[in-house]
Amino acid sequence: MNAWIVKLGNKLVGIITLVISLTVVAIVLFWQYQQSSSNYKQYQTVSQKQIAEMIYQSVSTRVQAINKQVAYIANLPELATLVLSKDTVLIEDKQREIANMFASVHKVCLLDVEIDNVSSDGCIGISFATLNSLREAKTNGGAAVVMMQVESEGAHLLFAQQIVDVQSKIVGVLVVALKPDTVRNILGDSFGASGYVELQQGKSGTALLASKGNIKWKKGQAIFSEKLPESYWQISYWSQPQGLIGFQWMLCGIALGIILIMGFLREGWQTYLLKRDTKILNQQLKDAEIGELKMAYPLVFTSMNDLANNIQALGLMYFQAITKKGATAESLLEKMDNAEQSNDLVRLDSNIDDEPDSL
């Protein structure tokens, strides 16, 4: 038991024990961090994809709502009658009436089915892209939503639906062109709260129509990219980079707490060992007084070994002197007590010399 205590009290052993303990703690904390980081990343990936899907569904619903509204108006029986009548005044009145049904209207046009050429005249300028949408509406019933003249003053959002008569014959096309701010309003401000989202146009998303969030978060490949139905658009989403900052601080706090606790424990242990060594030295002094010194008095603190050795040497000298002169420990102690009472300084060698040989 004493040997074990001595080993634990050794400074080098204490340092090695502390280093090993801290290494084990560091390994455990690092493993815990890796596990938590992996779980957190998986949670973040799933969570961010869910957010992106919610954004996608919201934008898709808004676009389809406008498309359905245009299709509903195009199917009104009176529109076919107006287009066939070719009455310019009535057609213009109806166009203004329809325009009031939409916010941020750029143009509303009731076009005759025979219009099939590029032109800058008429209700709306017809470019090759616009002509393609008109033909698509005549063929499929409706055209995919597209932004025309992107990044120009004449930019507009084009919706086109065919107009049919009672015999289901195509007689014209209803064109509703909305201002660009309609596209920006499709993306809500909250969409960029935890990531960066873009509304893009084109097969490869070459044209940026609107965005929300911090563009600095646009790094690498988007975690979500999906084409919107009934349009030439797609939604791309990049998540906000997030780490386990709070968890890292927590681990650092735990590690620091463990270090402090181990420091306090070591300090307490050192105090205990110091008291033990002091008790042993006191016992050694008592043993020297009565002439019953042991062969060794093991101490934890090596710095006290010199003191223990000196006590041991003085005790042996004291015992040898007593043996040589024939004095007894009781007689010497009695003389020392008498000397203290008379305030005289008594030397150990004089005490021994004064003792009669007959004792």
Image (cartoon, rainbow, N blue to C red):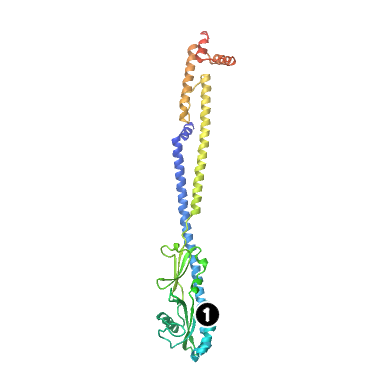
Q: Nearer the viewer, residue 83 or 77?
A: 83
In the picture of the structure, the residue carrying the numbered disc 1 is 69
> What residue do we see at 49% from left, 46% from top?
255
Residue 112 position in % (x across, y down): 46, 88
Q: Secondary structure at mark 1?
A: helix
Above or below, 171 relative to 225? below
Q: Residue furthest right?
A: 341
Q: Nearer the viewer, residue 55 or 1?
A: 55
Above or below, 323 relative to 213? above
Residue neighbourhood size for the residue with mark 1, other residues' Cα within 10 Å, grouped as few (<14), some (14–19), many (≥20): few
> What residue do we see at 46% from left, 43% from top?
22
Mark 1: amino acid? Gln
Above or below, 136 relative to 339? below
Residue 321 position in % (x across, y down): 48, 14
Q: Nearer the viewer, residue 66 or 102?
A: 102
Residue 341 position in % (x across, y down): 59, 15
Residue 270 position in % (x across, y down): 50, 34
Above or below, 194 relative to 325? below
Q: Nearer the viewer, residue 325 or 231?
A: 231
Q: Quadrant of residue 15?
A: top left
